[in-house]
Image (spheres, helix red, strand yellow):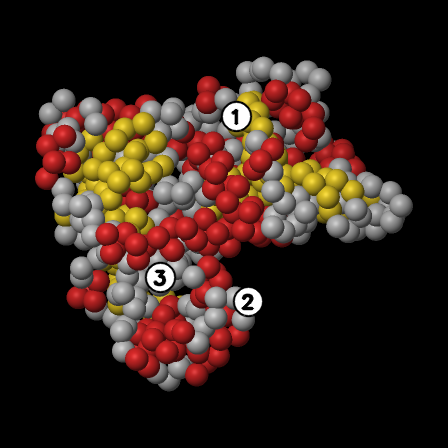
């Protein structure tokens, strides 16, 4: 395949992904959580770098990484899974440690931020004291323009406590994004990107008051490579002075070794195992998977926008467990075209103010609802005939399966079927969340098995009643470098999209015990999210 033909394949793939279905109204909303379909770049872009040769000659020419740089990054790499448990990070593969300002007063200010829970107070006080001296705050907390921090407690605090407007008050600033320099425009207390959405300040974000401040980058953008190569993961194998040998991991378990480097501001694939055909052909084979994940994200976001409630009566007696009862009554009222229904003398709505159906959900309902809604199977809005639109997934068609009962779903998935697979987490990696460090290590050890679209089955003791309970959460995004789950969707009181730590925090004695995964042949790009 010639370079021109390979580029044509990439262009074709970008068109396939762009035309995969009608975008739901909520996808156009601003300020959606990072990782949802409205904020992702196209998986394979027309300008995506195409490898032009095999890697043997390229590897022979690479200069080794400076041992000092490798040693300086070791603390960051050791702490990264722990940091990602609590905070979003840009998926940057660093080739040298971003350097903080070396002046004595800056060094002293950084040293006064303890690597403990007291970091919150110290960071808040620092930001307050420097509201009129933002350049000094930038010197203290930005390193070469990066919001980089390798101390665990400090990293998770600055990710929560510091915003772009704390660092800047200029009308326009600049951020490196997907290999390009993007202008961000001040609007009130926020900065907006070129699409008009609020610009997020994640750990490792690189920003400056002018484009010249973004020269001499110290990283390779693994997220950009994953998207443009159609890969799930970009796993480091070896790093060099200005390049890295990585393994591109695909949803169908294809693995391609490649060397990535930089051409100007953009991270590129310099070469790939198998030559010019390998990456575009693997991307084309796996395009359906990424379409499905985009649909899952859209469906989950729709239910968050519609604020679907957990299925628990507001006046549930202390001595009874009535989770799951409301949906039964809701369904009856919906099919009768009623606007409300009663349970235990309280009134509940059947639709929201916009006419969207609002079925109550237990946690496993949220998972099944997201799967089915992403396939096109969902309740019709008010005004139309009651019933569901036709989609490619319908779990009600499976005889004898109780989709509202997590143990039943686990048993079904373990029995060999055409819908679900089950993966059991090894006993050594079943660690309760309250042991934060061990929990993060355990998730990092199993991360190679976790992919987008998987369901984390969480089980253990809930402190409020001292009984064991299940919870389920849908993985929408993982870090391409570490594999840590970054964005999850669930319903534990109300449908929401959040981090793994937020998902686990309500019952810290619980642990991840299983994964559930839809069979790939059940994923269909033909239905749009209703």
- Residue on which disc 2 sits: 117
Q: Is residue 490 visible?
A: yes
Circle on res. 236: none
Q: Earlier in the sequence, mark 1 or mark 2?
A: 2
Spot occupied by residue 220 in the image (x, y as percentages of width and height):
25, 49
- Residue on which disc 3 sits: 148
Camera-near label (3 vs 2) is 2
**Image point 25% across, 31% down: which residue?**
257
Q: Quadrant of residue 37?
A: top left
Q: Residues within 10 Å of mark 2 (few under 14, many from 20)?
A: few
Circle on res. 518: 1
Camera-near label (1 vs 2) is 2
Along the line of sight, which residue is nearer the eye, 239 or 363?
239
Along the line of sight, which residue is nearer the eye, 276 or 481?
481
Q: Earlier in the sequence, mark 3 or mark 2?
A: 2
Q: Quadrant of residue 274?
A: top left
**Image point 53% across, 41% down: which residue?**
442
Q: Earlier in the sequence, mark 1 or mark 3?
A: 3
Measure the C-alpha gap from mark 1 to mark 3. Answer: 37 Å
**Image point 56% across, 46% down: which residue?**
439
Spot occupied by residue 223 in the image (x, y as percentages of width and height):
32, 45
């Amino acid at each position: 395949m010639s370079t021109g033909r390979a580029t044509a394949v990439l262009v074709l793939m970008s068109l396939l992904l762009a035309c995969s279905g009608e975008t739901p109204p909520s996808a156009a909303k601003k300020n959606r959580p990072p990782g949802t379909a409205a904020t992702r770049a196209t998986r394979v872009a027309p300008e995506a770098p195409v490898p032009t040769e095999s890697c043997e000659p390229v590897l022979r020419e690479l200069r080794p990484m400076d041992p000092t740089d490798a040693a300086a990054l070791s603390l960051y790499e050791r702490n990264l899974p722990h940091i990602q448990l609590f905070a979003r990070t840009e998926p940057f593969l660093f080739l040298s440690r971003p350097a903080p300002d070396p002046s004595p007063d800056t060094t002293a200010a950084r040293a006064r931020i303890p690597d403990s829970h007291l970091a919150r107070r110290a960071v808040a006080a620092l930001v307050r004291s420097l509201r009129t001296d933002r350049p000094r705050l930038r010197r203290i907390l930005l390193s070469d323009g990066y919001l980089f921090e390798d101390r665990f407690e400090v990293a998770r605090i600055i990710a929560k406590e510091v915003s772009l407007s704390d660092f800047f008050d200029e009308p326009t600033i600049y951020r490196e994004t997907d290999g390009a320099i993007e202008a961000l425009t001040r609007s009130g207390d926020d900065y907006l990107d070129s699409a008009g959405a609020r610009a997020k300040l994640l750990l490792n974000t690189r920003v400056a008051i002018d484009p010249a401040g973004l020269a001499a980058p110290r990283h390779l953008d693994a997220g950009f490579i994953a998207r443009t190569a159609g890969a799930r993961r970009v796993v480091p194998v070896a790093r060099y002075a200005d390049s890295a040998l990585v393994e591109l991991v695909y949803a169908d378990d294809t693995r391609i070794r490649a060397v990535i480097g930089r051409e100007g501001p953009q991270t590129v694939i310099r070469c790939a195992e198998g030559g010019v055909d390998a990456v575009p052909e693997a991307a084309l084979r796996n395009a359906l998977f990424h379409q499905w994940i985009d649909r899952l994200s859209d469906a989950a976001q729709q239910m968050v926008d519609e604020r679907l409630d957990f299925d628990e009566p507001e006046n549930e007696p202390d001595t009874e467990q009535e989770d799951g009862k409301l949906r039964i009554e809701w369904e009856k009222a919906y099919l009768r075209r009623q606007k409300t229904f009663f349970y235990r003398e309280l009134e509940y709505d059947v639709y929201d103010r916009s006419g969207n159906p609002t079925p109550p959900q237990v946690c496993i309902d949220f998972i099944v609802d997201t799967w089915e809604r992403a396939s096109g199977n969902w309740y019709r809005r008010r005004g139309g005939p009651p019933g569901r639109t036709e989609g490619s997934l319908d779990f009600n068609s499976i005889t004898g399966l109780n989709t509202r009962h997590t143990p039943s779903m686990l048993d079904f998935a373990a029995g060999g079927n055409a819908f679900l697979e089950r993966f059991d987490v090894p006993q050594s990696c079943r660690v309760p969340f309250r042991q934060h460090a061990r929990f993060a290590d355990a998730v990092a050890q199993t991360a190679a098995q976790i992919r987008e679209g998987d369901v984390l089955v969480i089980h253990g003791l809930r402190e409020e009643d001292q009984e064991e309970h299940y919870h389920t959460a849908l993985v929408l995004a993982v870090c391409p470098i570490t594999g840590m789950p970054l964005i999850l969707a669930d319903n534990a009181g109300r449908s929401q999209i959040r981090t793994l730590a937020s998902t686990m925090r309500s019952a810290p004695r619980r642990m991840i015990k299983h994964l559930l995964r839809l069979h790939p042949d059940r994923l269909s790009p033909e239905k749009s999210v209703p």
